[in-house]
Every structure is written in structure tokens, then in C-alpha cells.
Image (spheres, grey):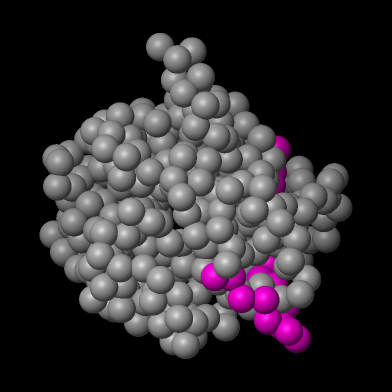
Amino acid sequence: MRVLCFGSLNIDYTYSVPHFVQPGETLSCTELRLFGGGKGLNQSVALARAGLNVSLAGAVGEDGRFLLSELGRAGVDTRHVDVLPGVRTGHAIIQNNAEGENCILVFGGANHCTGREQIDRVLGFFGEGDVLTLQNEIRELEYLIRSAKARGMTIAFTPAPMNAAVPLLPLELIDYLFLNEVEAGVLLGRRAEDAPLDAARALRERFGVKNVALTLGAAGSVFSGETGDYTQAALPTEPVDTTGAGDTFAGFFLAGALQGLDTQRAMYVASAAASIAITRSGASASIPDRDEVLEKIYRNG
Ligand code: RIB
């Protein structure tokens, strides 16, 4: 089994701020740091650090070559990332406030250059029994989903950033849907956080998705799928920067499920991984490896 993550690579400009900037306000930040980010890059790193062989496909400009080096050090195969001349790498402007929360503004750049030629070329290396993970920061998702399913691939999808195109995708072809309570609320047209397990079940029924994992921040996570319904509390922690927590959860949960962990255990491992990631700055830089996660679980009892 091979895992292909077809998704975004961003340069994350993370600004530490006392509070999120308000309309009309000019605010001085206390620190600026650059990190490797993008939901595709983050999830591929999480999958690799969880112990899977993973390839990332996508695109950067010349200014994003350093992301490929970072990915290489994390053990991610980047042969399918195109380096495009004359195009800027995608980037994100991230405000990180004193409570560890974030506001993210994304510029697509090279991520929006994904086309059918690249998709056909890359999917040619994958087939029956392989796994595809997707997020909503690249183009041609419907084509990707249909092409991968026609090849017999298992598909995981994180519909973030949420937009009006998501409900129109062939979600019935998705095996694992990862989303937070806000995204679930948009898809369902009602609040999801009041009864999250009901929301996860409703998403399965309405869209025909096989398995739905819903993350709820400090309130933990729920899962509804082929193995049943589950809830998992968040592990107590002091958040520094929550950027990439959802990507960490998705990567570790999917890795656990693919490695044969039972669902409750996969949720626990994913929660532990996310609880470590939010104690440090950055998206991909904050993602722990499997040994660190197992150590945390051991200490948590
Ligand atoms: O999910 C976190 C990611 O969202 C950040 O790394 C940023 O690049 C945006 O894509």
C-alpha cells in the first residue's frame, strides 16, 4: 500500500499578535516566523511521522524549493511536486494570538496550477489498494476524486478551506472525511457542535461518505463510520499555536486506521499527536513523530 497526498504547499508567515487585527486597525506584531505549511504538506508530514511511506504531489515556484528539502528531511517523497518557473509558491498569512488561536489568509499561487496533465501523470504511478489524501487548496478535485476511485484507490478528504464547491463534489466516493465543527455546520446548514455525533452521522447519511471524523478543538473529536460511532476527549494541554492541529489529527488517524489500529485507538493516537502539535509554533514544524506520541500516551496513562 502506498499513500499519495495530492495537495498544497505553502510558505507560512506566522505573526505573533496580542489579538487578531480588527477592521481599520493597524497592529504591530511581536514576532514573525516562517514555516513550511499548506494542508497537503502538513498532512504528508503527519503521515510520514506516523510511520507511513508517503508521496506528496503538488506544485511550488522556485521560491518554494526549500519546502522540498524540509519534506525530504521528514521522509516525504517529493518526486511528484512540480517546480514551476515564473509562479509564486502558495503562502499563508497567519495571525497567532496570545491564546494560541489563529486566523489564516491563504494565497493559492502555484497550488492553483494543478491540472489534469499532472493528475494523470502522477496517478499513473498508483492504483488498486493505494490511498489518496486530499484537501481543498488545489484545483480539479472532482477529476482527482473520480480518477483515483476509478483506479481503486481509497480516498481521504479534508474539505478545508470550506467553500460552495464542496457539497457539489462526489462525496459519496470519499472513504474518510475529516472536518471541524465549523465546516460540518456549513455542510449541514446547522450548528454541529451542540450534537457532534449526530452531525457526523448526518453527514454520512446526506452525502454518502463512509467514515466521518469530526474534530472539535478542546472538546475532542467524534467519529461515525463503518466500525461504529466513537467519541474521544482532547488530551489536556496549554496551546501555543493551533495551526496544523487538524492536519496532524487527520494524518495520524488515517495512518492508525491504515496500520490496523481499532478506531478508538486511532482516535486516541491522533488526539495525542494533535495535543503535542499545539504546544509549539508552526504547522509542519510542530508535528511530532510516532515515538513522541507513544511517549505522551504512556505518560497520560
Ligand atoms: O491547516 C493549516 C494550514 O492551512 C497552514 O499551514 C496554512 O498554510 C493553510 O494552508
Residue numbers of the magenta segment = 80-100
* Residue plotted at (52% across, 41% down): 49
Indicate left or right for 218 with 225 as reference: right
Residue 267 image point, x, y percent: 33, 35
User: Is residue 184 visible to us here?
Assistant: no
The one of 245 and 218 positioned closer to us in this rendering: 245
The one of 254 and 163 positioned closer to us in this rendering: 254
Indicate left or right for 228 with 75 as reference: left
Indicate left or right for 148 with 71 as reference: left
User: Is residue 115 visible to us here?
Assistant: yes
* Residue plotted at (28% across, 78% down): 146
* Residue plotted at (67% across, 61% down): 68
* Residue plotted at (46% across, 23% down): 294
**Residue 48 vertical placement versus 108 (above, below):** above
Locate the C terminus by quadrant: top left
Residue 26 image point, x, y percent: 83, 60
The one of 146 and 199 positioned closer to us in this rendering: 146
86 falls in the magenta region:
yes
Residue 277 image point, x, y percent: 57, 37
Residue 222 image point, x, y percent: 29, 40
- Quadrant for residue 91, please give it: bottom right
Indicate left or right for 75 with 182 as reference: right
- Quadrant for residue 177, please give it: bottom left
